[in-house]
Amino acid sequence: MSEGTVLYFGYGTSKVLRMVGAITGAEDLVGKPATLKGYGLFVQRFDQIPDIVLKTAPASFSPRQNIADNWPNTFESYVIRHDSESEVVGTLWELTPEQRELIKDWELVEFGWYQDTSVEVQTEDGQKVRVQTEILGEGQEVDRQVDGKDYNPWLMSPEEMIRIAERSRLEYFKRMSESQEGSPKPPEIQ
């Protein structure tokens, strides 16, 4: 592990190499199975996603508006939150700081959907490691809890998720470029 490496726990589709590669644009990602104890895996429906535009958001749209621009209203997503009786299986990724920022953008952290947090995961060999991940924002509702040890990571079409993740990455770089030029404008979604 190199200096500056960010350790990140991915769950749902973020435990899948193909998906994290699409989000980050990286082909040489390093990850290994890990388990997060004390958290439960839940499914959140489209209508439960926050529809508030934060003043501090990097662009002027709410998480729900962003999802509506890209997905049908049948959209569902995995989320995690505290649950002392549960655990979630995922992947411990070694990321660059830029790759971690791309994941935060994909997860709409700065837009108020998720909260960035530090948690401890356990690898298959019993090692306990402090990592970054996203948990559900305060006060948000969920539809149902699922078995965090045995779940299909894809709630939506894998091909569609990959396509949208790749587009989202390009939009992130465009937004960053525009903000550095002094003219921040939300990207047009096609």
Image: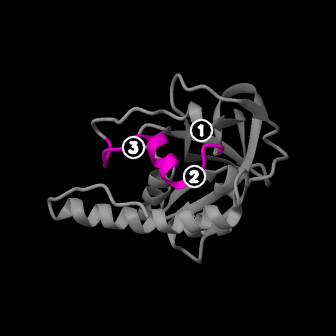
Where is residue 76 drawn, in percent x and y?
66, 43
- Residue in the image at 51% along x and 31% along y: 137
Say what secondary structure mark 1 lies in.
Answer: helix
- Image height of 104 relative to 116, above or below: below
Residue bearing mark 3: 110
Distance Cα–Cα, label 2 vs label 1: 9 Å
Mark 1 burial class by Cα count in 10 Å: few <14, some 14-19, many 20+ = many
User: Between disc 3 and disc 2, whose residue precedes?
Assistant: 2
Residue contact between numbered discs 2 and 1, judged by CB atoms under 8 Å: yes
Using the image, determine if residue 120 lies above or below residue 183.
above
Instruction: Inspect the image, locate mark 2, and give the three-letter code of the amino acid beneath it.
Output: Trp
- What is the crowding at mark 2: few (fewer than 14 residues within 10 Å), some, or many (at least 20)? some
Q: Nearer the viewer, residue 150 or 127?
A: 150
> Is label 2 in a helix, a strand or a loop?
loop
As for residue 59 lying within the magenta part, the answer is yes
Which numbered disc, 3 or 1, marks the residue that appears first in the sequence? 1
Query: On the image, numbered disc 2 is attached to which residue?
Result: 71
What residue would you read off at disc 1? 46
Q: Amino acid at mark 1?
A: Phe
Q: Out of 181 and 187, give the one closest to the viewer.
A: 187
Residue extent of the magenta highlight: 57-74
Identify which amino acid the numbered label 3 is placed on.
Glu
Work out whether mark 2 precedes mark 1 in sequence or the reverse, and give the earlier one.
1
Image mark for residue 170 = none
